[in-house]
Image (cartoon, grey):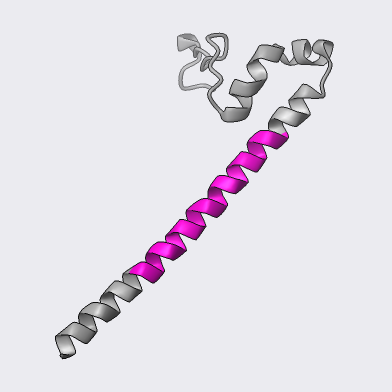
Amino acid sequence: MTQAILTASSWIQEAIFGFGDLLKTWKQNRARKAMIAQTRRELSQLTDHELRDLGIGRSDITSIANGTFHDERIKKPKTNENLKGWV
């Protein structure tokens, strides 16, 4: 009987912790989606001239907001071998 009670208690604890993890994940997803929506909204309010100054186009707004924007122009700067160790 004691074993059955301990097993049931373990199941209940796992269910409670699982539900807590579910709520935590749900809150994180909501916060992430809210940030994406805010970024998309703010970038959409910029004029074409302002977007061009930033180096992006209107078609890039969604990928920038989602964090999937990739541009070959944005690379890690090359280092000057002659200055290695000095700078």
Above or below 5: residue 27: above
The count of marks equals: 0
Q: Nearer the viewer, residue 57 or 19?
A: 19
Residue 85 in percent (x, y) is at 46, 22
| Residue 21 occupies quadrant | bottom left
| Residue 12 occupies quadrant | bottom left
User: Does the magenta run of residues contain 25?
Assistant: yes
Dominant secondary structure, magenta: helix
Q: Can residue 56 be seen in this view?
A: no
Quarter of the picture holding the N terminus = bottom left
User: Does the magenta run of residues contain 62?
Assistant: no
Q: Which residue is drawn at 27% across and 76% down?
A: 10
Q: Residue at x 22, y 83 (%)?
A: 6
Above or below 24: residue 44: above
- Asked whether, in this view, residue 86 is left or right of residue 3, the answer is right
Q: Residue at x 59, y 22 (%)?
A: 63
Above or below 21: residue 2: below
- Asked whether, in this view, residue 7 is left or right of residue 82, the answer is left
Residue 25 in percent (x, y) is at 48, 52
Magenta residues, as a range? 15-38
Q: Residue at x 23, y 86 (%)?
A: 5
- Residue furthest to the bottom in view is 1
Quarter of the picture holding the C terminus = top right
Q: Is residue 31 visible?
A: yes
Residue 27 in percent (x, y) is at 56, 53
Residue 75 in percent (x, y) is at 52, 14
Q: Which of 59 and 80 is in front in this view?
A: 59
